Image (tube, rainbow, N blue to C red):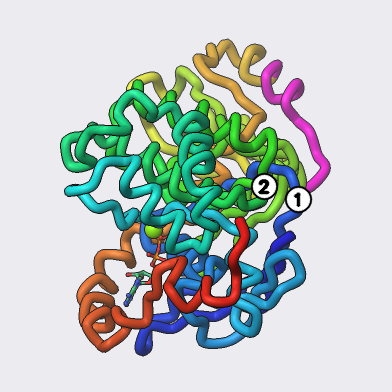
Amino acid sequence: MIKVSNLTKKYGSNLAVDNISFEIEKGRIYGFLGPNGAGKSTTMNIITGCLSQTSGNVTVGGFDVFDQPVKAKKLIGYLPELPPLYGDMTPKEYLRFVAEAKGIKSSAIGPEVERVMFRTSIKQVSGRLIRNLSKGYRQRVGIAMALLGDPEIIILDEPTVGLDPRQIIEIRELIKSLGEDHTVILSSHILSEIQEVCEHVIIISRGKVVADDTIENICNMNKEHPVLNIVASCTPDAAVAIVDEYEEVTHYAITECDKGTSLELTLMPGTNITEKLYFAFAAAGIPLSYFSDRVSIEEIYLKLTESVYDEEEETASVTEEAASDANEEEYKPMFTEEDNSDEGDL
Ligand code: ADP
Ligand code: MG
C-alpha cells in the first residue's frame, strides 16, 4: 500500500530523516513510535506529499508521491500535527469547504459531509463555531476532514496530544473503528497508546528505523539477549559472590537500593539460569523481593531510543535556526486548487 525507500530529509544541515525504508500493508493499524524530534512528522509530511524529500522515494498504492501526487494523495486522508482548522467556521461549513477543495463534486458534498460527521460523532456540534469546541471535538473535526472523499489510508499525527484522559479514550476508540475498514498509520511518542491501538509498530529514533515488527515479535527479539532483573535483600558484595559463579552471565549492573541490592544481569544468548539462580539465593538465605526474566516493551523502547533526550536539548537551538532558513515555506497543504483541476468525481 505504501512503500518508503531510502528516504532522507535534511533541514539545512540537520538530518531529520536518515535513509529510512519500510512498507505499510493494506488493512492494518500501524504505530509510528518515537521520542519528540525523532522524525515522525517529517516522514508523515513527505508520505502525504506536503513536504519534499532530500532523497529517496515514496509510493502510495503504486503511485509515486512526487511524480503522480494527485493520484497518490487521493488515497490518503491526513490529520497533521497542527490541523488547519478555521475557528470562525462551523464544522459543517469547514467540511464543505474542504470537500470542495478536495475536488468532490458539488452534488456529492452534502451526503459526504453528513457521512464523515456521523462517523466521527460530531453532528451535535456541527453548527457551533470551531473555536468554541473542546480540543477533543476539534480533533474529531480534523479526523472528519481526513475522511472526506473516503480515502483507503488514514494518517494521524499524534492525534491525542493535548486531550484529557476521557477524550484520549474516545479518540482511540474512533481510531480502532477506522482500522476496521482503512489502513491506519498513527504516530505517537507514547508507547502505551501504540500498544493499545496498533497491531504493528515502527519505532523511529533520530531519523532512523530501529524496529519494524509486531509488538509481540519486538518483545521476543529480546530473547536473543536474555536479561534477568533481581532485587535481593543483601549487600552488593553478597550478591556479586553468587552471580560470579555463573559463566552464563556476560555482564551485570549492580546498584544498592532501599530493599538491598538491585541486579540487572545480561546472559549469553540462548541460556537460561532463572531456576538455578533463584535456588542459589534461597540456599544462601537471601530473600528476593523481585525476580523477572522478562523485558517489557517499555524497556525495549527505552533501550532502542536511549540518550535521545539528552541530545535533543543540545540540537534545539541549531534546529530553530535551520527552521528559519527558508524551510518553512516548503510545506504544502494536503489539497490545493490545482490538485482538483483534472478531477471531478469523489
Ligand atoms: P517528531 O514528529 O518525531 O517529533 P519531527 O519530524 O517534527 O519529529 O522533527 C525531526 C527533526 O527535524 C527535529 O530535530 C526537528 O527539530 C527538525 N525539524 C522539524 N521541522 C523542521 C523545520 N521546518 N525546519 C527545520 N528543522 C525541522
Ligand atoms: Mg511530530
Can you give x and y, in whole percent of width and height, for residue 205 in the image? Answer: 50, 62
Residue 265 vs 176, above or below: the answer is: below
Q: Nearer the viewer, residue 59 or 305?
A: 59
Q: Residue at x 50, y 15 (%)?
A: 289
> Left or right of 40: which side holds 58?
right
Give the quarter of the figure containing the N terminus. bottom right
The three-letter amino acid code for the residue at tag 2 is: Thr
Question: Quarter containing ligand 1?
Answer: bottom left
* Residue 159 inside the magenta-drawn segment: no
Can you give x and y, in whole percent of width and height, for residue 26 in the image? Answer: 75, 50
Q: Which residue is mark 1?
A: 26
Q: Is mark 1 within 8 Å of ligand 1?
A: no
Say whether marks 2 and 1 touch (CB < 8 Å).
Answer: yes
Q: Quadrant of residue 312?
A: bottom left
Q: Which residue is mark 2?
A: 183
Q: Is residue 296 visible?
A: no
Q: Residue at x 52, y 82 (%)?
A: 53
Can you give x and y, in whole percent of width and height, for residue 112 in the image? Answer: 53, 43
Specify the label residue 297 is tagged with. Answer: none
Residue 287 vs 134, above or below: the answer is: above
The three-letter amino acid code for the residue at tag 1 is: Lys
Give the quarter of the figure containing the C terminus. bottom right
Q: Nearer the viewer, residue 255 or 229?
A: 229
Residue 49 vs 145, above or below: the answer is: below
Region rendered in magenta:
269-279
Q: Is residue 287 visible?
A: yes
Label 2 – label 1 distance at C-alpha: 5 Å
Q: Nearer the viewer, residue 229 or 132?
A: 132
